[in-house]
Amino acid sequence: MPRESLKYLLIAAASIGFVILPFVLESNYLLSILIIIGIYTLVVEGLGVLMGYAGQVSFGQAAFFGIGAYAVAILTTRYSWGTIPAFLAAIVLPALVAAVIGRPTLKLKEHYLALATLAIGILVHIFFNEGGELTGGPSGLTGIPYLKIGGLVFDQDYKFYYLIGVFVLLVFLGVRNLDRSRIGRSLRAIRDSEVAAEANGINSAALKLKAFVFSAFLAGLGGGIYAYYITFISPAPFNFNMSIQFVIMAVIGGLGTIWGPLLGVSLMVALGEVLRWLVPLFIPNAGGEYQIIFYGLILVLTMIFKPEGLSTGWRKKTVSDSEEQEQKKENLTVSIRR
Amino acid sequence: MNILDVNGLKVFHGHAQALRGVTFHARKGEIVAVLGANGAGKSTLLGALSGIYNAKAGEVVFNGKPINRRTSGYIVKQGLILVPEHRQIFNTLTVQDNLLLGAFHRYNKDKSILYEDMERVLETFPALQGKEQQTAGILSGGLQQMLAIGRGLMANPKLLMLDEPSIGLAPMVVAEIMTALRKLREDGTSIILVEQNAAAAFKVADRAIVIERGQVVISGKPGELVNDERVQQAYLGRTRDQAGTVAMAL
Ligand SMILES: Nc1ncnc2c1ncn2[C@@H]1O[C@H](COP(=O)(O)OP(=O)(O)OP(=O)(O)O)[C@@H](O)[C@H]1O
Ligand SMILES: [Mg+2]
C-alpha cells in the first residue's frame, strides 16, 4: 500500500476511534483524564511554538492558564457575564498580559523573558491567593455555570471531550500551517541565527512577541475550558510547579513538532496518575512534591537519550544523519576555537 | 559618488567603547577592504551600519539617506545588506529557504521574481546547484559561506558588507568567493569586505581602511598600504618577511 493512503487510513481510524471512545469507555475517570490531557495539550502547543520556534522559554504558562480560568470564574460568578463573553475574556486577557510583559523584555537580546515570566507567574499566584472577595483567596471560587454555546449546554464529560477534541484539532492545524508559513520559517531562522535574521531585515523582537502572545492565548483558552469543566477553581493548580510541568511536557514531547505536545502531556499526565497511586504505597505521608522529582528525572533522561524529544526521529539512522553529526561536531570545534 | 558616508561613529557594548569615532566612505561600485586585528571593532562597525547595534554618536548616510537610528528592517530595504561573521546560515532550514529568507523584505512581491533571483544566485555559486532542498546545516563550510553570501544577494543589495567570508576556508574556496565578489562589483554592487586574510582582500579591493581599537588609523589603495609600516604592524604580522609575501602575492 502506498504511504500516502496508509496515512489517510490511519487518520481515518484515529478519527473513528476518537469519536466512539466515550461510548466504549466504562469509566468516567478515564474520560476525565483524556479531557485534562486535551486541555494541557492546548497550553503546551503554545509553549512549544514559543520554545521550539522562537527559542524563548516561559516559566509562567500556569499563570496565563490561571488568568484564563479565573477570568471565567470571576466574570461569571461575580459579574454575571454570559458564558461566551467570559470565555472570550479568558482568551484575550492572558494575551494582553503577555503583550505588556513581552514588549519590553523581548527587545532585550538575552533570556529576560524567562525571568519576567517567572516573576509574573509568582505574582499572579500571589494575587489568586490574596485577592480576597474577588478571587476567593486560597479556597477559590465555586459555582461556575456550565458553558452554553447556542442551545448546547456543556454539562457532561463526553461533551467536553468532543469540544476539546475540536479545539485541539484546530490548534494542530494552526501550528501545522504556521510551520509552513513565512512566519514559521522566519521564527526558525531567528532560532538558528538571530544576527543573520536581523541582518536580513527580520524583526526578531516583533516575531518573538507574536509567538509569546500566541502561547498566552492558548494557555488562556485552556484555562477557560478548564474552569468550565471543573466548575470550581482554587490557586493551587496554577502555581510555579505547574509552569515547570508545562515546560517539561513541551521538552519531552519534542519542540517544534505538532504531535510532541500531545505525547509529552499524555506521558506526564499518565505518570502523574500512576505516581499518585504508587507513591503512597511506599511513602505513606508523601505529598505531591514527590512527583516533581520523577518529572525532573524524566526530563534528565530525555535530555540525555533523546534531546530532540520523544515524538521525532525514531527512523533508522541514515548517511546524512551521521554527516549531520559530523558537521555539528565540526561546527562545535570551530566555535570553541573562536 | 559615495554610496556610504560614515562620520564619527561611536558604539558601546555596555560600558566598553568598541568604536571611537569611525569616519570613512565607500564609493559606488568599489570594493573597500576593512582590515584590523582581533577585537579592533570591525564586526561592531558592520553591525552598527546595519542597525543591529545602536550608535551613541555619529552620522551614517547611505545612498543619500541618513540611516543611523533606523531599524535593520529599514536599512535592509534601502539595500545595505550584511553577510554576518561566522556565516550564521539558518542551519535547520533548507538551502532554498535560506535564500528565500534573504529576500524577506520583498516577500509580498511576485514569487516568480524571487525564484528568478534565486536562479541567478545559483549561477553565481554553481556549487550550490542541485542542493536546494538540502538542510543548510549539513553543507561544508565553503558551501555555507556561499549560501550566506547568496542569502545576502537575495536581498538585492546596493552595498553588500561581508564579515570575514574567507575564515576557515581552503584557498581554492577563498579564490572562488573572491572571484564572485569581483563579478558582483562588475554588475554594479558596491562591497565592503572585512577580512583577516589580507592577501586575499588586497587582491580584490579598490581601497582599504585599517581599524585599530575602534578607529580608522589609515586608508588608501592596497598597493600603498601593503608597504606601510603601520599596516604590517597591525595586520600583516610583525615581520617584514610576511609583508613581503603579501606584496609578492599581489
Ligand atoms: N556583543 C558584545 N558585547 C560586549 N562586547 C563586545 C560585543 N561584541 C564585541 N565586543 C567587544 O568589542 C570589541 C570589538 O569587537 P568586534 O567583534 O567588533 O571586533 P572584530 O574586529 O570584529 O574582531 P574579530 O576579528 O575577532 O572578529 C572587542 O573588544 C569585543 O570584545
Ligand atoms: Mg569580527
Image: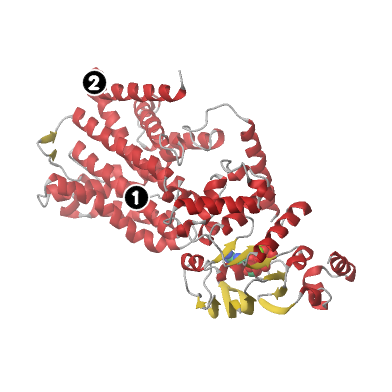
- In terms of sequence position, does the residue under pointer 2 or pointer 1 come before the other? 2
Does residue B89 appear anywhere in the picture?
no
Tally the numbered discs. 2
The quarter of the displayed image where residue B231 is located: bottom right
User: Three-letter amino acid code at disc 2?
Assistant: Ser
The kind of secondary structure element at disc 1 is: helix
The CA distance from mark 2 to mark 1 is 35 Å
How is the rendered protein coloured? secondary structure
Q: Is residue B125 left or right of residue B71?
A: right
Q: Name the foreground residue: A259 vs A232.
A: A259
Rendered location of residue B115, percent (x, y): 52, 50
Rendered location of residue A144, percent (x, y): 14, 42
Indicate which disc residue A27 carries: 2
Q: Residue at x 61, y 42 (%)?
A: B131
Q: Is mark 2 within 8 Å of ligand 1?
A: no
Rendered location of residue A3, percent (x, y): 46, 23
Does B168 sit above or below residue B185? above
Instruction: Name the image quarter holding the N terminus of chain B.
Output: bottom right
Q: Which residue is mark 1?
A: A214
* Quarter of the displayed picture in which ligand 1 can be seen: bottom right
Does residue B190 appear anywhere in the picture?
yes
